[in-house]
Image (tube, grey):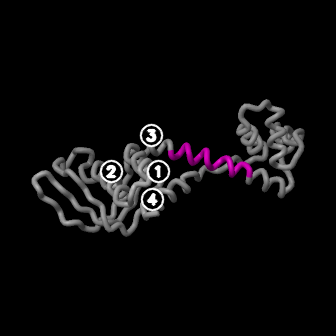
Amino acid sequence: MGLIEDRLEEAAETAYTQPIPKTLGARIRFLLKQEKGLSRAEAARAVAEKIGKSQRTVERYRDDKIKSTKPDTAAVIEAEVKKLWQPIVKANKLKAAITTGGIKVDVRGKFGFKSPKGTSNDPRYRRLSRRLDAATAAALFEAKAAGASEEDLAQIVADGLRADYFTDGGARATSLQKVELTGIDHIRFSIT
């Protein structure tokens, strides 16, 4: 994997900082909700099998009639919740990033420019910390999933920065055709 691909994966993995439910009852209700297509009793039975308790005990947890449990049972319940909780939160955060929110990038690398009349600017190191729009975030994750090269991913980042930073959404440097990003020393993404 390349640097940009590694950092995108890291951003996706750290995107789910939303905590799991705190109380025993809330955790059990979450586990029961994940048993889709089952009746209440069947869902309670399925959760009971996962955590090593009886169906009736799970129903008591659900109804907050039992508010605490032994540490080993609590650890099993917490592990089951974490296993199911994080993929849901991660998927929601990624969906938000590629549909509305975008992704933040902090990059230090060589940026070069090309304009229509053959003029260019020699590449020089810059450090930028900007939010890339949702379309750029979607393009990054799609390209990563398709196995794009490091250069292709860097160009997607450069195009996003061109639109956001260098041309300020068309308010300045309107003749700037292309921004190239090479020699990346540092890059980090964050999905918030």
Q: Determine whether 74 is above or below 31 in the image.
A: below
The residue beneath circle 1 is: 145
**Can you tell which of label 4 and label 2 is closer to the viewer?**
4
Please tell me how crowded label 4 is: few (under 14), some (14-19), or many (20+) other residues with Cα within 10 Å: many
Q: Secondary structure at mark 4?
A: helix
Q: Compared with residue 123, is residue 15 higher up or lower down, i.e. above or below?
A: above
Counting residues from the start of the chain, the first of labels 4 and 2 encountered is 4
Q: CA distance from mark 4 to mark 2?
A: 16 Å
Q: CA distance from mark 1 to mark 3?
A: 17 Å
Please tell me whether mark 3 sits on a helix, a strand or a loop. helix
- Nearer the observer, 126 or 185: 185
Q: Which residue is mark 2?
A: 160
Q: Earlier in the sequence, mark 2 or mark 3?
A: 3
Q: Earlier in the sequence, mark 4 or mark 3?
A: 4
> Which label number is shown at residue 132?
none
Tell me the amino acid under the disc marked 3.
Thr
Tell which circle, 1 or 4, labels the residue nearer the N-terminal end.
4
Q: Which residue is mark 3?
A: 99
Residue at image location 44% in from the left, 50% down from the top: 146
Tell me where the magenta segment starts and ends, as one range.
80-94
The circle drawn on residue 5 is: 4
* 39, above or below 74, in the image: above
Between residue 161 and residue 155, name the one nearer to us.
Answer: 155
Indicate whether residue 63 is drawn in magenta: no
Q: How far, Cα to Cα, is label 1 from label 4?
A: 9 Å
Q: Earlier in the sequence, mark 1 or mark 3?
A: 3
